Amino acid sequence: MSKYVAVAGKGGVGKTTFTALLLRQMVRQKKGTSILAVDADPNANLGEALGLDVTSTISEIIEASKDPKAIPEGMPKNIFIEYKLQQSLVESKDIDLLVMGGPQGAGCYCYPNDILRKHLQNVGENYDFVTVDSEAGLEHISRRTIPRVEVMFVISDSSARGIRSAGRVHDLIKGLKSAVETIYLIVTKTTEGSMESLTEEIKRTGLTVIGDIPIDPLVVEYDLAGKPLFDLPDDAVSVQAVQKILNRAGIFN
């Protein structure tokens, strides 16, 4: 049975950076483990962080299917979409990637969500792990796009405002009564003493802190140069911090 790991949090707190480094460490710690990464954030950039080229997204496929001329004569629309979805899967030696993409034009985002949910049900169980970079609003949790989550990491930066936002994410998850087994808080961009100053704010969220990720100059350098974070060296501050978090979470247990 696949294990689903989700990463949530508002934009700008380092959510995708953490997801990329989590995937990096999962690959290195468990050689031969099959992993599907899902970029479910409309502001999709997980592929860049992993060094993978994305040629199509689910939203683009849905938009293209609105044109009757794009669908071969006699082929049902759902079969055409499923065929295109199989083609959109980015396959690599270590990780496969499926990208949701942003809404295309006017209209509801519900249909792409529904397509992703059904597609995940079909392909997700072929992998040992499915790791999802979620959108800030947790729509994929509320709509059951992700069938279940064994471990969820809620990401905040090292500010009181960020911690409060993480607390609201926690409240939303509890209110949904969704199938999330374990929830952890991770604080990013920390400096010496920042965790101590946030102690009371963190207590009010009800979240369990599993670790923090200090500011890493190498992450800034790689981002500026457009280099994949997946290629960061083993001794990078952020890489070592994420490895400690992975060990504490016991994801491979």
Image: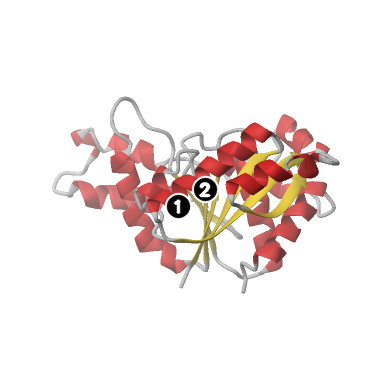
Name the spot of residue 177 as percent of width and height, x first.
39, 56
| Residue occupied by mark 2 | 170
Quadrant location of the C terminus?
Answer: bottom right
Residue shown at the point (29%, 33%) measured from the top left:
108
Locate residue 168 relative to residue 117 in the image: left or right. Answer: right
Viewer-side residue, 52 vs 18: 18
Name the spot of residue 151 as percent of width and height, x first.
55, 60
Could one spot residue 51 in this view of the protein?
A: no
Q: Specify the label residue 24 is tagged with.
A: none
Position above or below: 130 against 115: below
Locate residue 148 relative to residue 128 in the image: left or right. Answer: left
Name the spot of residue 94 as percent of width and height, x first.
61, 60
Q: Quadrant of residue 166?
A: top right
Residue shown at the point (40%, 47%) measured from the top left:
140
> Outermost residue toward the top?
106
Amino acid of disc 1: Lys
Name the spot of residue 180 as percent of width and height, x first.
47, 59
Position above or below: 204 against 96: above
- Circle 2 — which element? helix
**Label 2 Cα neighbours within 10 Å, binned few <14 / some 14-19 / many ≥20:** many
Amino acid of disc 2: His
Cα gap from disc 1 to disc 2, whole angstroms? 6 Å
**Label 1 Cα neighbours within 10 Å, binned few <14 / some 14-19 / many ≥20:** few
Q: CB of mark 1 within 8 Å of CB of mark 2? A: yes
> Outermost residue toward the left?
74
Residue shown at the point (78%, 39%) measured from the top left:
197
- Circle 1 — which element? helix
Viewer-side residue, 237 vs 66: 237
| Residue occupied by mark 1 | 174
Locate residue 241 relative to residue 204 in the image: left or right. Answer: right
Residue shown at the point (26%, 38%) measured from the top left:
65
Could one spot residue 64 in this view of the protein?
A: yes
